């Protein structure tokens, strides 16, 4: 349900509150007959508003059903045969099943779903200790975050050396986790970063998202950032402030945002899409081919 409809409901509620307060205060000084007149008018207005809201809800439900029906044909074969890795960097995992579904409808497959744990964005001694312990047990894993993220990107794009594993030890150390079974399929060239935060995430985007994106793009991968519309804090402004050159989608928890995700995953599409103030357009322009 879009923000305009929510604001519509809030505005109407505020009007009713004001009318009710005015009616109570006014009843102390005006005649009972006038109070009854206002009460009747308020009752009729309430009926009208409830009918209007019911009609709006039905209209929204109809649009949702329509999009459910046409989405498979809209995205059909757009990602035919393409493997996609989904990396959750933010606090919201709810959109993951819908992302998997729309990629499948487009002919692709989300082959890996990985969560980067919050400890990776920590700048304290806990992360340093964890990285040093990891390096001690697995000398192929660097003891610094930046180099470790670069190695993670290389492993996901090019594949894992069986004699020097990366992903398993990172999971065992509590730095990443898999929604999919392990071993995962680490060779991939299309990546979705699922962002959106419950609080200011500038530190995380700077320390984790930015170097990971840079490493993936250096390897020729297509990277798209998305977040749910209902995220308490949007990460898009931080991406802009850091100059991260990736397409962003701020409403991936609805069908319009999922459609935008498919178009951007095709590659060659840049920009900011969605419904928040940072969006430049609702959806990308579909390819004519």
Image (cartoon, rainbow, N blue to C red):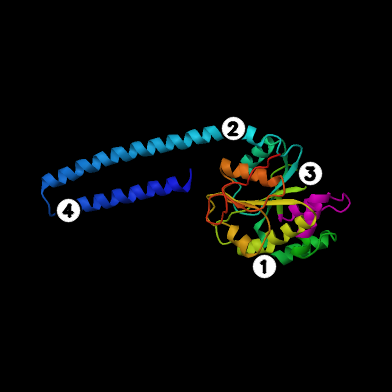
Q: N-terminal of the two: label 4 or label 3?
A: 4
Asked if the magenta segment contains residue 164, the reply would be yes
In the rendered image, which residue does mark 3 sit on? 185
In the rendered image, which residue does mark 2 sit on? 70
- Binning the other alpha carbons within 10 Å of mark 2 as few (below 14), some (14 to 19) or many (20 upward) gives few
Magenta-tinted stretch? 149-175
Residue 43 horizontal side relative to residue 180, left or right = left
Q: CA distance from mark 1 to mark 3?
A: 30 Å
Q: Nearer the viewer, residue 28 or 57?
A: 57
Q: N-terminal of the two: label 1 or label 2?
A: 2
Secondary structure beneath dot 2 equals helix
Which of the two discs, 4 and 3, sits closer to the camera? Answer: 4
Splitting the image into 4 quarters, where does residue 74 fall? top right
Identity of the residue furthest to the top in this view: 69
Q: Nearer the viewer, residue 188 or 166?
A: 188
Q: N-terminal of the two: label 2 or label 3?
A: 2
Residue 235 in view (yes/no): no
Residue 27 in view (yes/no): yes
Res. 123 mark:
1
- Binning the other alpha carbons within 10 Å of mark 4 as few (below 14), some (14 to 19) or many (20 upward) gives some
């Amino acid at each position: 349900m879009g923000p305009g409809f929510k604001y519509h409901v809030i505005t109407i509620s505020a009007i009713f509150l004001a009318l009710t307060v005015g009616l109570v205060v006014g009843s102390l000084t005006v005649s009972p007959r006038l109070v009854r007149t206002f009460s009747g008018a308020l009752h009729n207005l309430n009926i009208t508003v409830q009918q209007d809201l019911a009609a709006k809800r039905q209209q929204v439900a109809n649009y949702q059903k329509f999009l459910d029906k046409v989405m498979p044909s809209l995205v059909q074969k757009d990602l035919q045969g393409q493997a996609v890795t989904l990396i959750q960097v933010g606090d919201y995992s709810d959109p993951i099943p819908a992302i998997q579904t729309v990629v499948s409808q487009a002919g692709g497959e989300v082959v890996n779903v990985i969560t980067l744990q919050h400890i990776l964005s920590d700048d304290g001694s806990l992360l340093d200790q964890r990285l040093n312990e990891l390096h001690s047990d697995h000398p192929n894993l660097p003891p610094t975050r930046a180099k470790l993220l670069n190695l993670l990107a290389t492993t996901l794009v090019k594949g894992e050396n069986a004699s020097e594993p990366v992903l398993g030890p990172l999971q065992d150390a509590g730095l990443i986790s898999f929604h999919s079974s392990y071993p995962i399929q680490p060779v991939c060239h299309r990546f979705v970063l699922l962002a959106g935060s419950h609080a200011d995430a500038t530190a995380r985007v700077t320390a984790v998202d930015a170097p990971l994106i840079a490493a993936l793009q250096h390897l020729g991968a297509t990277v798209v950032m998305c977040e749910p519309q209902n995220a308490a804090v949007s990460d898009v402004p931080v991406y802009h402030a850091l100059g991260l050159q990736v397409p962003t989608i701020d409403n991936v928890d609805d069908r319009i945002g999922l459609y935008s995700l498919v178009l951007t995953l095709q590659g060659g599409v840049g920009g900011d899409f969605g419904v928040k103030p940072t969006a430049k357009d609702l959806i990308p322009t579909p390819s004519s081919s």
